[in-house]
Image (cartoon, grey):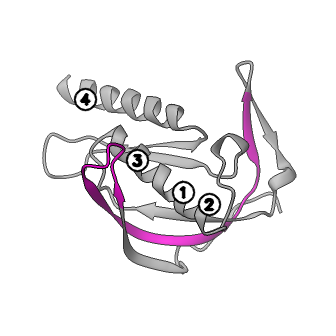
Amino acid sequence: MGYQITQLHNPINGEGSFSFWNSSYDQIHTVGITQAHLENDTAKTIHMNGKAYLDFNRCGTPLVEVVTKPDFHSADEVTDFLKELQRVVKWNNIAYADLEKGQMRVDVNLSVSDTDQLGTRVEVKNMSSFSAIRRAIDYEYNRHVATIQS
C-alpha cells in the first residue's frame, strides 16, 4: 500500500495502566496507557555507514502501537518500562519483539517544563535499541533544558 494505516480514532484498547519493577527491583512504577491500536507498517528503516535505507519487505505487516501517558521522569523509567513490555510480549507469544531486528520499535516523545504544564513536545521516531533510546532522551532533555534556561 505504501502508507501507514492506523486506528488512532477507534483504538482496540483504551485507558489502562501498566505496572513494572525498576531495574533494581526495589520500586514499582505504574504508567498510564492512553490506548493501544492496530497499525499497518510501511517499511523498516536500516541505518548503516551513516546512511538510512528503507526495507519495504515489512509493508502491510500489522503492528500494535501502545501510547502511554506522560508519566515518565527519567530515561531509566522509560527503559525499565520498555524492557518489561518486551518481556510480557515475548512471554505471551505475541511477538518476538527484538528491537535490533525491527520487530519492536519505539517513538520517544519528550517534553520538559519548569512548571506543572507540559512543555513543547519533540518526537524521535523508530528507535531500535535501548541504548539509542537512552541517548535520545538524554540529548533531548539537555537540549530542552538549555532552551528553557536561555
Q: Tell which tag, 4 or 1, sits nearer the viewer.
A: 1
Is the residue under label 2 in contact with that under label 3 (CB below 8 Å)?
Answer: no
Q: In the rendered structure, find residue 90 and report the number of the disc placed on it.
A: 2
Q: Secondary structure at mark 2?
A: helix
Give the alpha-carbon distance from disc 4 to disc 1, as whole Å: 33 Å
Give the alpha-carbon distance from disc 4 to disc 2, as whole Å: 36 Å
Residue position marked by numbered label 4 in the rendering: 145
- Residue 121 visible from this viewpoint: no
Q: In the rendered structure, find residue 80 and report the number of the disc placed on it.
A: 3
Residue 50 spot, x, y in % from top left:
70, 19
Q: Residues within 10 Å of mark 4 (few under 14, many from 20)?
A: some
Q: At label 1, which amino acid type do we have?
A: Arg
Earlier sequence position, callout 3 versus callout 1 = 3
Against 51, residue 41 (above or below) is below
Residue 42 spot, x, y in % from top left:
75, 55
Q: At label 2, which amino acid type do we have?
A: Lys
Is the residue under label 1 in contact with that under label 3 (CB below 8 Å)?
Answer: no
Residue position marked by numbered label 1 in the rendering: 87
Closer-to-camera residue (137/23):
23
- Residue 63 visible from this viewpoint: yes
- Quadrant of the drawing holding the C terminus: top left
Is the residue under label 2 in contact with that under label 1 (CB below 8 Å)?
Answer: yes
Q: Secondary structure at mark 1?
A: helix
